[in-house]
Amino acid sequence: MGKCWWNGTIYTMQNEGDTVEVVYTEHGIIVATGSKEVIEVEYDGQIEEWVDLQGGTMFPGFVDSHMHLIGYGETFLKLDLSNMNSKEEVLQAIADRSVTVPRGSWIIAEGWNENRWLDASPITRDQLDAIAPHHPVLLRRICRHLLVVNTPAMKAVPIDTERTEYGIHSGIFKDSDQDIILNAVPQVTESYIQEALRVAIQHAWSQGVVGGHTEDLSYYGSCSNVLRVYQKVIHEDSMNFRAHLLVHHSVVGEWRNADEKLLTKSSYLEFGAMKIFADGALGGRTALLSIPYADEPSTNGLAIHSDEELAQLVSQARSYGLPIAVHAIGDLAAEKVIAAIERHPACDGAIDRLIHGQILGGSTIERMKNLPLVIDIQPTFVASDFPWVVDRIGQDTDLQLYAWKTLLDHGLRCAGGSDAPIEQVSPLFGMHAAVTRMKPDDSTETIYQLEERLSMFEAISLYTTGSANASGHEYDRGKIREGYSADFTILTMDPFLNKPSKLLTDCIGMTVVGEKVVYRNHE
């Protein structure tokens, strides 16, 4: 017995403009598509339910190709600074929190972004000491590549106070140096991680997201802790969500040796590539460039690994039969990643990922065309990073900045993600940024790089066929087609027939995962 989905516009995403009238599903799989008249006759006696789309617009379920799912859930449990527009607002929020939590308890907040402030000078240890002298305070920047702490937090860490390279005077720590502080933070409980994961999935459903490619296994103590949480929430609690877990190289050994029950896979939980970081981020000027930063010529960024170390990590992944997924924001970082892949090619049938790829050189793009590679892009970064990113990189450069259209025109495969909690989970916001190259709230309607705008079909493809390609599911997910998963996102409007600004409205009508309606907008 199955269900018929009808009375709406159903885009299959097999080709631009391709639609069907009815979709028939059984046991979480699409069995047939076609006209209502034919499906009614062919499956007479098997149709248990007619699901009325009420004139809505159905797509294959949207999948976020790059996120930190548990970390995103934590933003609903921790102090969120991402929407604060001044340093004073951030400091006041910390001061207010210090009044409500017991003396000596850690205050952890995330998401501050000085590019939203008129005064873009960094928060310092002294400023935090002044407002919360009796609490260890840790504030992570929105990029998660920089944090700042106060003196009580520093006292919890065994640091040689004669050394200054670790931010002794400022309290600021970048990239891998953050671990000095993070390792001192009291470990969270499994119940807390479970709560964060549940909240994240529920919110993702409300944004039309049926699944996500996520990297969480190295952030919460033991890798096994996180594996238990995923098994509990996804399998035991039956929260239908297509979780595709990347495995950070620092825990890949623990992951491989984990209890077999913790590695149980299903159509809702699977394991993907080995995650590696090649560089940092643009906000802290640690993304690795081939040229000095225009606004700080003394640096061109940071390589997390030497060339040989990076090659060894790629070789390690190959020995495990794993593809790689490498964070590379700067052009020199991407160049080093491509060189390592060329030195140690992917296993047959495997697909590597270049995560972010925000700044690329032309020769690197040409080399990428010859590799089984998907670029995980985050379209909303255009809205967040322009125009300040131009000040970072400079005007007179041949480098390609956030050049999504250029990548697609070169035949490269791209997938769309949010990098949540860096950005909020919303494929529709990502699509808006991809097709407009504008900030949602910009009254001047400034377009950043007009020539890099995507068509609506290309933008939607990032979160459907693009995400499916990235996870090796190009033949069973990402399209409305016989044999594919019955995962659907239903909008209350048709993005092909409306202005892009409609994407910014509350237009998620229904989210369906494995034939089950997991979210319905009742408004």
Image: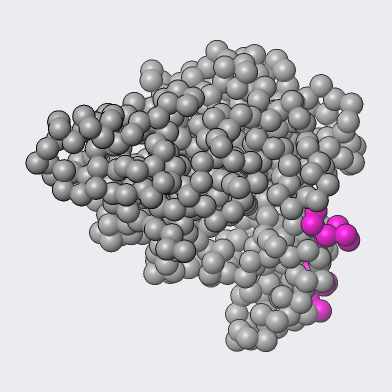
Q: Vertical placement of 245 versus 171: above or below?
A: above
Q: Position of residue 450 (x, y in %)?
A: 76, 30
Determine if residue 414 is in view.
yes
Residue 484 lies within the magenta run = no
Relative to 363, say whether 8 is above or below.
below
Q: Nearer the viewer, residue 100 or 37?
A: 37
Residue at the (73%, 80%) spot, across then down = 95
| Residue 228 shown left or right of residue 245 in the figure | left
Q: In this figure, which colouring scheme has been used for the structure?
A: one colour
Q: Quadrant of residue 305?
A: top right
Asked whether 309 or 189 is in front, the reply is 189
**Which quadrant of the rendered structure holds the N terminus?**
top left
- Figure check: 506 above or below 288: below
Tag count:
0
**Is residue 262 something that shows in the picture?**
no
Q: Residue at x 68, y 55 (%)?
A: 142
Coordinates of residue 152 in the picture (x, y in percent): 70, 75
Would you place residue 131 above or below residue 34 in this image? Answer: below
Residue 199 location, quadrant: bottom left
Give 319 or 120, whichever is nearer the viewer.
Answer: 120
Q: Which residues are magenta?
A: 115-130
Q: Is residue 515 left or right of residue 163?
A: left
Q: Residue at x 20, y 41 (%)?
A: 26
Percent of width and height locating residue 444: 83, 47
Foreground pick, 479 / 222: 479
Question: Does the magenta-highlighted stretch encompass residue 123?
Answer: yes
